Image: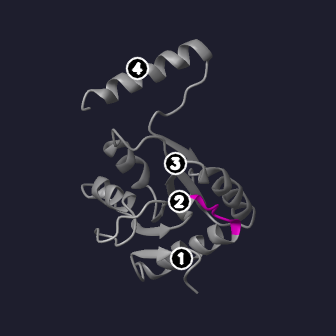
Amino acid sequence: MEESMAVIEQAHDEFAKIFGRRYDPWIEEFMTDDAEVVFFLQGAHAVTARFAIQHMRDRGLKVGMARLRTIRPYPTDRVKEVLSKFKVVGVIETNMGLGSVSSGGSLYAEVCAALYESQKRPLVLSFMAGMGGEAIVLKEFYWMTEKMLDAQRRGKIEKRTHWVGFEE
């Protein structure tokens, strides 16, 4: 597993040579250049997230998205490099890790571990959303963004894990 990262990167290089397109094998970034708060997620919820982010950007909010392309091997250094640029990271969780460090999802712990050695650590929130394959609707992305912006204003999080659609 430790040597698989080099093999994956080599396969991406070969793909780029053949097809003339290059993708980051670990993380897709969307509208992160000047973002202050970002969603960190994996999977198909990124489609709706992109739409919501574009809509919020049109209203002047500095929000972006970083989508994890693979969970194993976990790209710790790449996650640290990408996420340490932001003020707040909202980890969208679609699986439960009840009794874990966040009492929510498992991805939160991975993100916090990756950021642990970073000189600049953002505030990190966990959002339990899209459980059981449910769609995460636009109003929920707006609600999560408001929670991240509130954490940014306060300089701290009010609580670690939010259950989207079950609070407020």
* N-term-proximal mark, 4 vs 1: 4
Label at residue 166 = none
How far apart are the alpha carbons under marks 1 and 2? 11 Å
For the point 39% across and 75% down, which residue is it? 160
* N-term-proximal mark, 3 vs 1: 3
* N-term-proximal mark, 4 vs 3: 4
* Quadrant of image for the N terminus: top left
How far apart are the alpha carbons under marks 3 and 2? 8 Å
Residue under numbered circle 1: 147
- Label 2 CA crowd tier, 10 Å (few <14, some 14–19, many 20+): many
Up-down: is 79 above or below 5? below
- Label 3 CA crowd tier, 10 Å (few <14, some 14–19, many 20+): many
Label at residue 39 = 2
How far apart are the alpha carbons under marks 3 and 1? 19 Å
Q: In the figure, is residue 150 to the left or right of 123?
A: right
How far apart are the alpha carbons under marks 2 and 4? 28 Å
Residue type marked 3: Arg
Residue type marked 1: Lys
For the point 69% across and 61% down, which residue is it? 52
- Label 1 CA crowd tier, 10 Å (few <14, some 14–19, many 20+): many
Q: In the figure, is residue 21 to the left or right of 75?
A: right
Label at residue 67 = 3
The x and y percentages for residue 68 are 47, 46
For the point 61% across and 18% down, which residue is it? 20
